[in-house]
Image: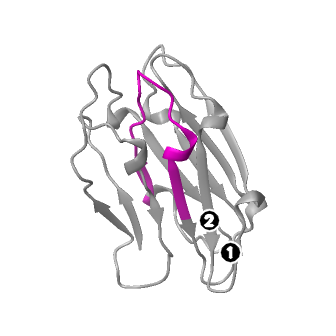
Amino acid sequence: MLVLVETDSLVLIEALTLLLMLAEVEASPEPLLVLVEPEPLPELLLALIEADTLLLKLVLADSDALIDADTLVLMLVLADTEALIEADTLVLMLVLADTEALIEADTLVLMLVLTDSDALIEADTLVLMLVLADSDALIEADTLLLKLVLADTEALIEADTLLLMLVLAD
């Protein structure tokens, strides 16, 4: 079962409250996708990038076709006109498990586009922690390939820009 936090266009996700967790995906009668409403958060006063203009798309490719790409769409708003997001306040934790085989870390390509209305968020201010786990072993975080693509927002990034793409291949 996958669990994600859904936001709306009136809410700014504060860095300390952002925690996206993808639990083990196994053959079970449970639904594949469950939406969990977060606690009410402070509204962004100066500017807000609407949630429906920003899509985080996870593409999971496995030789056994574990998860189809169109089954995972995460919507996320990251906007701050006052300050850059601190590294220790934003943690994305992804737990991906395959019942048959563990997807190796060196096949993971993470591309993330984050925008700020005033300045680019520098790569060293953002921490993305990805944990790939099965019942036997954990792949250490330092084996993951992380690529950050930063963009300036003269205009809103549209949904088809694909803010986040995770490609996992056996």
**How many other residues sit within 10 Å of disc 2, few (<14), some (14-19) or many (≥20)?**
many
Q: Quadrant of residue 65?
A: bottom right
**Which is nearer the eye, 73 or 127?**
127
Q: Position of residue 21 (x, y in %)?
A: 46, 63
Q: Position of residue 49 (x, y in %)?
A: 36, 28
Q: Quadrant of residue 133?
A: bottom right
Q: CA distance from mark 2 to mark 1?
A: 7 Å
Q: Is residue 13 above or below residue 21?
A: above
Relative placement, left or right, of 10 versus 27 is left
Q: Which residue is mark 2?
A: 131
**How many other residues sit within 10 Å of disc 1, few (<14), some (14-19) or many (≥20)?**
few
Residue 34 among those drawn in magenta: no
Q: Which residue is mark 1?
A: 138
Q: Position of residue 113 (x, y in %)?
A: 56, 34
Residue 81 among those drawn in magenta: yes
Region in magenta: 71-94
Which comes sooner in the sequence, label 2 or label 1? Answer: 2
Disc sitting over residue 104 in the figure: none
Marks 2/1 in contact by CB < 8 Å: the verdict is yes
Relative placement, left or right, of 130 versus 103 is left
Q: Position of residue 143 (x, y in %)?
A: 77, 60
